[in-house]
Amino acid sequence: MAVAALSSAIAACDPGDVTPRAGATPVARAPVANTPSAMGAATSAASAPTPDEAAGQALYTKYCALCHGPEAKGYAADNAPSLVSETFLRSATDEFLSMGISMGRPGTPMAPYGARFGGPLADEQIRQIVAFLRARGPKAQTLAAVAKGDAEAGKPLFAALCAECHADDPKRIGPRLDLPSFLHIATDSFLDYAIRMGRPGTKMEPFQDRLTPAQISDVIAYLRTFQNPAPPSLLPEPTGKEPIVVHPKGKHAKFTLREDRFVPAADVAAALAAKRRLVILDARASSDWRLGHIPGAISMPYYEMKRLDEIPRDGTWVLAYCACPHHASGEVVDELRRRGYPKTAVIDEGITFWRNTGYPMALPPPAEGTKAASPAPGKANKVGAGKASAGKVGAGQAGAAKPGAAKAGAGVK
């Protein structure tokens, strides 16, 4: 589970100098040394886990370790952050952790995992995961209040110091900080503490000696400008009875793979446009499938591959995708290959690239208070059992790839 939901690293990778804003009045905060001795021991002597902690560890291993690593130290996939860094756990309440797991980070590989948001976990199970994480570090502490900042003054600071790692850019090396789902649960005090203290053991350095308290408040004020879009709507839950094969009467597709494993998204889009026979598996959590998926893709979460035995063994290409873009989908493809399926591949660039390029998407109706884009003539976007819905997908329109966007690659016939 890419628990970017618990994204805590707020980084700046440029060591350049930053001059305090004219007239800024620092808010008194005692500096805190960012060393293990100053931070203190995270936990007392090791003891046997409680039943909740043991249950939480099992759940964590099943749903979270794929991206956050077996010890929750992060960066196993997709820059998923550490969940047990001392500075993070000192500033993150149990409620923050629970809401992050439950709500996820829509727009990133971190899916909503709470049952209330279409995920697989009940509230009790989320509480057990939180108990497991908390046992690996300190309790949350009361954080200092933060003065109101100036968003306009914070914008250039963020661009200079933070954007390289945290902006909406596929090349970033840290979690995005402009996500409404994150900002909804992250208090100003949490953000302030993360910027000042950093995340020891990661590239997120402490900034308490480089930025004034007023400048940190300005960066926080700028982040708050991303907080309040309309909540997303969802497709109906997958029934487990969706058709396995896309275009069952079509000719078999032909692909040339990179490294015998990856197929370009453009080649897949071209095959769909040509109505080639395919099986497409969405390896993300089912909650992400409900936010939007490749038309005809069935929900096949990496942690629960229930329908694999339904896939035909007749030479049909079986493709998997995720948002990582290779990790969760790779788990599904590896399992298919273990079972002897000869034609399997990971869609190379993943669903985020697919969506942003404007390739066809099955999308839910637009959220209340938003206006849908009109689909291209005669190109209704298929949703669920065939209901039409229109919505803008990246630079293209829902249900129709941009002109020329689905041209066949060299390996598609």
Image (cartoon, rainbow, N blue to C red):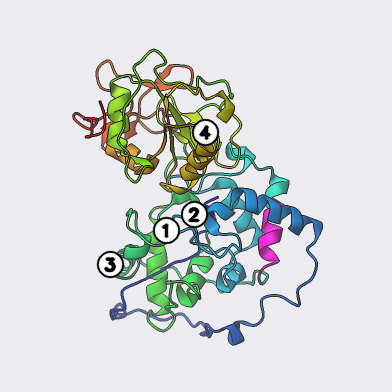
**Which residue is tagged 1?**
177
Q: Position of residue 142 (x, y in %)?
A: 63, 72
User: Which element carries disc 4, helix, strand or loop?
Assistant: loop
| Neighbours of disc 1 within 10 Å: few (<14), some (14-19), many (20+) | many
Give the magenta part as a residue range: 127-136
Q: Residue at x 38, y 79 (%)?
A: 211
Sequence-first disc among 4 and 3: 3
Which one is closest to the eye, mark 3 or mark 1? 1
* Residue 323 place in picture, x, y as percent: 43, 45
Viewer-side label of 1, 4:
4
Pointer 2 residue: 182
Residue at the spot of label 4: 340
Q: Which of the two residues, 274 or 78, is positioned nearer the viewer here?
A: 274
Residue type for callout 3: Pro
- Amino acid under disc 2: Phe
Q: Which mark is residue 156?
A: 3
Q: What is the C-alpha distance between the residues marked 4 and 3?
A: 54 Å
Mark 3 lies on a secondary structure that is helix
